[in-house]
Image (tube, rainbow, N blue to C red):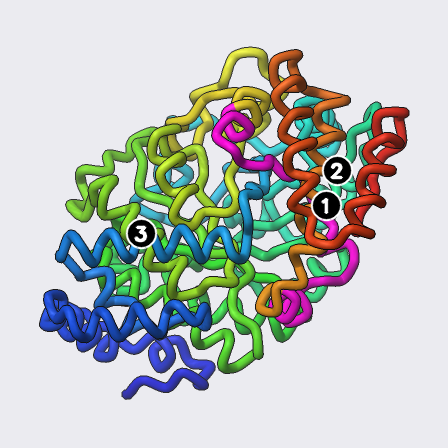
Amino acid sequence: MSYDIHSLKAEDFIDDGEIRQTVRYAQEHKNDRALIDEILQRARARKGLNHRDASVLLACEDEEKLQEIYALAEQIKKDFYGNRIVLFAPLYLSNYCVNGCLYCPYHLKNKHIPRKKLTQEEVAREVVALQDMGHKRLAIEAGEDPVNNPIEYILECIQTIYSIKHKNGAIRRVNVNIAATTVENYRKLREAGIGTYILFQETYNKENYEILHPTGPKHNYAYHTEAMDRAMEGGIDDVGIGVLFGLDNYQYEFAGLLMHAEHLEAVHGVGPHTISLPRVKRADGIDPDEFDNSLSDETFSKIAACIRIAVPYTGMIISTRETPEVREKLLRVGVSQISGGSRTSVGGYCEEQRPRDTEQFDVSDERTLDEVVNWLIQAGYIPSFCTACYREGRTGDRFMALCKSGQIQNCCQPNALMTLKEYLMDYAADDTRVHGEALIERELANVPREKIRDIVRQRLVKISAGERDFRF
């Protein structure tokens, strides 16, 4: 068996030997300043780096070069994403699950966690609660259970979510994070109008993967790892990947993650739309210290910066698993999407008090969505509730072409400002509204084209008068 980026077999495009050679090569060259300078020079072209070159940057311990890595990551983030931060929320539909994942409290053998599955009426109530917060974009989550959570249930929930229009609220994009499935089911998800299909690999180390998933369909490493190829075959061209850092050696995971992105680009002509950066967190019956692969906040930041340099066009996501301090640090060096006001329990948004008994993991950032929005504004970011690219058909290779050319800025900046204006009018606290209006006025000057800038001004007036849902 040898490394083959074009193969559709998991153990060929995520080749264990190639990853181990990459990690060794990176360790051998981590203090090679000439090589690091050469890699950084190539990275400044904004064309990305392969997994081996990026791994050298990750291994680098030279403080001067580390500062160059962080500075480059920050500049690349600004070049492609500006100061916009997209906001979303997870919606947990069901915690019934037949798998035996050792790091997740939803595993089948956990007999004391309450099991819950939302009815369509409960889904509707959750959606209203999320709309009343100001959310426009959701990521739906469900355990793997063919009896309790069949694809028909997921599709019905998507239909319910899109159907709810409460006051000025509407969920305009539903991303889906469910277990690996068939090409036929991916076609059904596409036909249902989903945004991005998201699936975390958890770990790319096959041996450890099988230990961590001792029972259930998720035990099948190949079927899980090849899911994105099936999703793309089923017509879903926006896919999101990620690993659960802390389950295995982070250098191994980093190389595997980038090899997966390279594989998708090579085979399908477009890499992942997003890369998520979760870390193992404490949960019901789960102790992160048991995995012995925990990584420091500093190392976590370095991983984010190196991913941003390696895949400059790909969105990066950080969740409320992380503290506000860690999220702030990662926003600077690469992250472009964050969750806000999240509840990781089934049916948590309708409850005044945050439910703890069905949480998938402990939430470290428990601020409300408005507090997160205010924080972003005062830090100089534009909180964006935009979903226009998906709704205008700018997905997959069409999105990437616009992103790589820089033309996406003519859409994203105006759309971010208009959706922020909607939020300020409909949901924001007084202090958030004051700071937000000032930010919009400042940022209007940064809309690249004068004609678009004038249109945005006109539409902002219309939003103030009650009209909604403008987009470029």
Disc 1 secondary structure class? helix
**Tag 2 secondary structure:** helix
Q: Does the magenta stretch include residue 383?
A: yes
Q: Which mark is residue 70?
A: 3
Is any atom of residue 362 visible in this view? yes
Other-residue count near label 2 (Cα within 10 Å), few / some / many at <14 / 14–19 / ≥20: many
Compare residues 60 and 40 and report the one nearer the observer: 40
Judge left or right: residue 386 versus residue 289: right
Judging by the rendered image, the residue that carries numbered circle 1 is 414
Q: In which quarter of the image is the N terminus?
A: bottom left
Tell me residue 176's x, y (percent). Answer: 60, 50
Which amino acid does the dot numbered 3 rest on? Tyr
Bounds of the magenta segment: 375-402
Left or right: 367 in relation to 108? right
The quadrant holding residue 124 is top right
Q: Amino acid type of disc 1?
A: Pro
User: Mark 2 = which residue?
Assistant: 418
Give how far apart the Cα atoms at labels 3 and 2 are.
Answer: 31 Å
Residue at 82% from the left image edge and 27% from the top image edge: 168
Left or right of 277, for residue 391: right
Could you tell me which secondary element the residue under label 3 belongs to?
helix
* In contact (CB < 8 Å): disc 1 and disc 2: yes
Measured as percent of width and height from the top left, residue 312 is found at 46, 62
Report, in whole angstroms, how far the alpha carbon at label 1 lies from the one at label 2.
6 Å
Q: Where is residue 52 in the image (x, y as percent from the top left)?
A: 27, 74
Indicate which disc, 3 or 1, sits on the residue closer to the N terminus: 3
- Against 178, is 432 above or below? above
- Determine if the magenta segment contains residue 355: no
Q: Distance between the residues labelled 3 and 1?
A: 28 Å
